[in-house]
Image (cartoon, grey):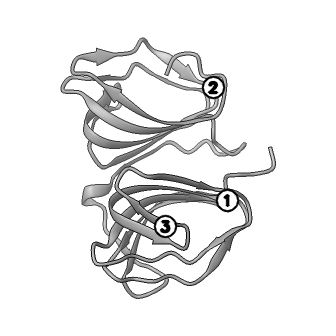
Amino acid sequence: MGDEVARATSLVRYAPGSQFERHVHGGGEEILVLEGVFSDESGDHAAGTYLRNPPGSAHAPFSREGCLLFVKLRQFASGDPASVRIPTRSTPWRPGLVPGLSVMPLHSHEGIDTALVRWAPNTRFNTHSHPGGEEILVLDGVFSDEGGNDPVGTWLRSPRWSRHTPFTGTEGALIYVKVGHLGSD
């Protein structure tokens, strides 16, 4: 969280009572709170909260009880200044593209889309490609494709133009997914 000099995707655990000095996110920061409560000047953000702090934003983050975060640094498209706060545990779901899928859009900007996708048990999606790449974090259940079965906590990053046919078995799955952001730079 201190000297951010490169793109990074990581899990960050705050011990109870942890805090950081006020700092600027020159390249922006995306956070999905996985466990506990993450706090800063904008409030307390419980597990399930999605946050976007655009390039140039600053905060002094802390956690009273401790928390686990999925964090993406310096991965904002130029010209995307949106600040976002979404309490996903109380936000409605939308029907997905195939029966058994529910989608919660989190952010979209010029072909870069971030969402939560809930897969009912035994759901199959069409074979498709990702011109701008795809990144997935499995939050619940088991997410599968021809590459294998990926349980909770698995992080997948597929390059530009990758193809797959995803599906779920009897457990279903909940995933964080971001597409379109893996450009040629």
Q: Give yes or no for contact between labels 2 and 1 (Cβ–Cβ under 8 Å).
A: no
Question: Where residue 19 sits: x, y (%)?
Answer: 33, 16
Give the alpha-carbon distance from disc 3 to disc 2, as whole Å: 37 Å
The tag earlier along the polypeptide, 3 or 1, is 1
Numbered disc 2: secondary structure:
loop
Report whether 97 appears left or right of 41: right
Pick out the residue farthest to the left: 65
Query: Where is residue 93, by image quadrant?
Result: bottom left
Residue 19 versus residue 175 in the image, above or below = above
Q: Nearer the viewer, mark 3 or mark 2?
A: 3
Q: Nearer the viewer, mark 2 or mark 1?
A: 1
Report whether 176 appears left or right of 80: left
Numbered disc 1: secondary structure:
loop
The tag earlier along the polypeptide, 2 or 1, is 2
Give the alpha-carbon distance from disc 2 to disc 1, as whole Å: 24 Å
Look at label 1 and name its amino acid: Gly
Q: Which residue is mark 1?
A: 133
Q: Which residue is mark 3?
A: 148
Q: Tell me what residue is drawn at x 67 percent, y 53 percent.
A: 181
Q: Tell me what residue is drawn at x 40 percent, y 19 percent.
A: 60
Give the alpha-carbon distance from disc 3 to disc 1, as whole Å: 18 Å
Q: Which mark is residue 26?
A: 2
The tag earlier along the polypeptide, 3 or 2, is 2
Residue 77 versus residue 120 in the image, above or below = above
